[in-house]
Amino acid sequence: MIPQTPTWQKDLIICSCGCKKEFKPNYRNGILVSKLHPNCRLKSLHKEFKPSGVCLASELTTARNKPEKRVKTSRQNAMDRADEWFSKYIRLKYSFESGVELFCSCYTCNKPKPILEAECGHWQRRGYKTVRFHTNNARPQCHQCNYYYQGKPEIFELNLIRDIGLSKVDELKKLAQEVGEDNEYFYREQAAKYRKLFNILLKERKHQNPWK
């Protein structure tokens, strides 16, 4: 005769903490160990035995795990705005039309990219404030050349020498070593300047604004 499983080993019970979870109870010598679901029981043990002032990883909220977002200064916001309008102007200036879309050829690998996917690459780094918004120092690039290959400066320079001449390339090098402006007023000026030039060029070429 096959012995039957006792009822207390097969019946599910509801967790007593109010979470309404059903679980198979654990008995020792016929005595119910706990009326709490295993996870709820573990949480209660943590609360009971953890040292004061200790915060468990399970108690940390998602928001607490995220790094605090730094608030940008008005100078930084103005610089971002100037970069945005300068980038749009450079990409529009060197774009070409294919069908109803505008494309840019990467200056260092010649791959065509939709104008919204192209980036504004700099030959002399943007940290050099005197050439950050210099049109001879910037051309459209693909993300791979601009980001992963740090702009491919050697190829960039050779192409610039071909396009604007060695003397102007040397002028850019010297200009980059000078001390430039780095204040909110300067960036606001640059943003206004290239926003105006962008809109003039857009009107001349009779294009719709790709960023709208």
Image (cartoon, helix red, strand yellow):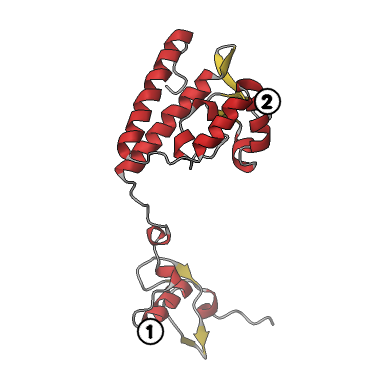
The image shows a total of numbered marks equal to: 2
Looking at this view, name the residue that lies furthest to the bottom.
29
Would residue 33 be found to the left or right of residue 196 on screen? right
Q: What residue type is labelled 2?
A: Asn
Asked whether residue 118 appears in the rendered view, the answer is no
Residue 10's x, y, as percent? 54, 74
Label 1 sits on what residue type?
A: Pro
Mark whose residue sits in front, 2 or 1: 2
Q: Nearer the viewer, residue 168 or 198?
A: 168
Front residue of this view, candidates 40 and 15: 40
Residue beneath disc 2: 110
Label 1 environment density (alpha carbons within 10 Å; few <14, some 14–19, many ≥20):
few
In the image, residue 124 lies at what x, y percent?
55, 37
Determine which residue is flagged by label 1: 51
- Compute the Cα span from label 2 to label 1: 63 Å
Query: Considering the image in quadrants, where does the N terminus appear?
Result: bottom right
Q: Where is residue 185 in the image (x, y as percent from the top left)?
A: 30, 35
Classify mark 2: helix, strand or loop.
loop
Secondary structure under the numbered disc 1 in the rendered image = loop
Answer with the quarter of the image where residue 202 lies.
top left
| Residue nearer the viewer, 120 or 45 | 120
Query: In the image, what residue occupies the spot 38% across and 58% down?
Result: 63
**Left of 176 or right of it: where is 98?**
right
Of pointers 2 and 1, the one earlier in the residue sequence: 1
Neighbour tally class for label 2: few under 14, some 14-19, many 20 plus, Cα within 10 Å: few
**Camera sees residue 114:** yes
